[in-house]
Image (cartoon, rainbow, N blue to C red):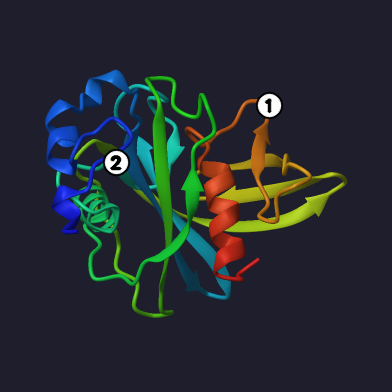
Amino acid sequence: MPSALLRDKNGLTEEEFLAAYRPKDYPRPSLTADIAVFSQEAGALQVLLVRRGGHPFLGKWALPGGFAQPGEAVTQTARRELEEETGLKGLRLTPVGLFSQPGRDPRMWVVSQAFAARIPSGRRKEAKAGDDAADTRWFRVSACPEGSHIQLRLTGAQEDFTVLLEDVTPPDCTEHEYRAKGDCALAFDHAAILYRAMETLAIL
């Protein structure tokens, strides 16, 4: 029997089911892309951050990224947002993971697909802030264990800060999950995304 004529337990064909389907009956998250861009300069690993120009987390540093538009694949979102916020384009993006911890964005239910990219040594171009980014800057970044936590250290031209990450991986999970402890200098859960990106690219 042609699939178009198959009926479900309620006696509906797929066409009839879709005609009656009401998406508003189901809560749906918004989708974003966040990108950790790394460069190796003068023997030091660096990551590109943008300073947020609006609420929430106004003035805090964050990874480049933003909301997906209708009809847009999330990889396209990552490339578009990266170019709009930093001027960078043509980078090879490596998927890092999906971040969906409740409350990760104070505005609403937001799920983010994170990506990582590397710029070969000597080929880095200075990024230029655009769109809703107030500034862009490269920070030297390093990560090392500190007791039961991971110390993430970021050093820029005029400021530096440290973030402590704790491992909150459930016992039945194989992929590590991290959460910033205390007040964090990075917006949203971007410290955890940054560290996961470093793990993904094996540049710890």
Point out residue 159 in the picture as x, y percentages from the top left corner.
Answer: 53, 42
Q: CA distance from mark 2 to mark 1?
A: 25 Å
Within 10 Å of disc 1 (Cα), the crowding (few <14, some 14-19, many 20+) is few
The one of 93 and 2 positioned closer to us in this rendering: 2
Point out residue 13 in the picture as x, y percentages from the top left corner.
Answer: 18, 40
Image position of 101 (left or right of 153): left
Q: Name the image quarter holding residue 116.
A: bottom left
Task: For the residues labelled 2 and 1, say whether their Cβ atoms are less than 8 Å apart.
Answer: no
Residue 66's disc number: 2
150 lies above or below 41: above
Q: Quadrant of the N terminus?
A: bottom left
Instruction: Choose the circle earlier in sequence order: 2 or 1.
Output: 2
Q: Amino acid at mark 2?
A: Gly
Residue 182's disc number: 1
* Residue drawn 52% across the image and 27% down it: 102
* Residue drawn 68% across the image and 51% down it: 176
Q: Amino acid at mark 1?
A: Gly
Image position of 198 (left or right of 168): left
Q: Quadrant of the C terminus?
A: bottom right
Furthest residue in direction right, as rendered: 147
Image position of 185 (left or right of 176): left
* Camera-nearest label, 2 or 1: 2
Q: Is residue 150 visible?
A: yes
Q: Name the image quarter holding residue 119.
A: bottom left
Q: Is residue 159 visible?
A: no
Within 10 Å of disc 2 (Cα), the crowding (few <14, some 14-19, many 20+) is many
* Residue drawn 38% across the image and 25% down it: 58
* Residue drawn 50% across the image and 62% down it: 46
For label 2, the SS is strand
Point out residue 202 in the picture as x, y percentages from the top left corner.
Answer: 61, 71
For label 1, the SS is loop
